[in-house]
Amino acid sequence: MNESWSKARIQYAILAGSFLIMIFFYPMINPIYGHDELKREELVLSEKPVFNKRFGKHRRNWVDLYFAGQKETYKISSIDYECLNYKKFMDNIDQGDKVTVLSRDKEVLAFSKNGVEYMDFEKAQLLKHKRKKSAYIFFWIAFIGCIIPVFFKKQPVLNISGYTISVSFILIVCLSWIIAFLMVGQ
């Protein structure tokens, strides 16, 4: 057996193990909550909400909320920020307003004032579910794509219309993403 293929098989096995670990632990990351799992609070804003942006490789937007009688800062971030009605929020929310929040660990998942919702909680939960599903599908496809080459004694190749393509990890990852996006699709 070719020594370089033997090393590659070990790398595929390690990658397959990594994807298997992600399959088991990914559901714990960014959990999806129902209304009954959130803490409902009636609070008064002690300051005007602060909108923050971080630029660069990992661009991020979030809102810091400061409430009277609360030491910690509440945040609206991630997918929940994407589901915030920004214009309506900016026009109608100010210091001293009494608002209702549904939160978990100081992360605001629903925000309303006088019965008017400023965040689409259901849409945010749907987006979280959709993104989690696409990642989960990707991890399964990548795991299967990495475990299969481990069982080959020689390096696997694809023959397509007379062209020979050696199977590589980059090819497997690209195909996994394409399949995951097609399966989850809009």
Image (spheres, rainbow, N blue to C red):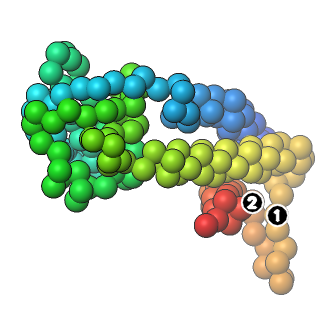
Where is residue 177 shown, x and y percent of the image? 63, 59
Where is residue 167 shown, x and y percent of the image? 75, 60
Judging depth in this view, the residue of 67 and 166 nearest the camera is 67
Q: Which residue is mark 1?
A: 157
Please give left or right for residue 175 compared with residue 54 in the image: right
Asked if the residue at tag 1 contacts the one at tag 2, i.e. Cβ–Cβ closer than 8 Å, the answer is yes
Q: Quadrant of residue 140?
A: top right
User: Where 142 sits versus 176, above or below?
Assistant: above
Label 1 environment density (alpha carbons within 10 Å; few <14, some 14–19, many ≥20): few
SS under mark 2 = loop
Query: Which residue: 33% across, 24% down?
Result: 41
Residue 133 in sight here:
yes
Where is residue 1 shown, x and y percent of the image? 87, 45
Q: Which residue is mark 2?
A: 167
Residue 77 in sight here:
no
Please give left or right for residue 184 compared with residue 69 in the image: right
Query: The residue under label 1 is which amino acid type?
Result: Val
Q: Please identify the quadrant where the C terminus is shown.
A: bottom right
Label 2 environment density (alpha carbons within 10 Å; few <14, some 14–19, many ≥20): some
Please give left or right for residue 67 compared with residue 47 in the image: right
Residue most extreme to the front = 114
Query: Which residue: 60% across, 51% down?
Result: 130
Judging depth in this view, the residue of 155 and 91 nearest the camera is 91
Q: Considering only order in the chain, which callout, 1 or 2, is on the residue closer to the N terminus?
A: 1
Query: The residue under label 2 is which amino acid type?
Result: Val
Judging depth in this view, the residue of 182 and 16 nearest the camera is 182
Separation of disc 2 and disc 1 at Cα? 5 Å
Residue most extreme to the bottom = 161
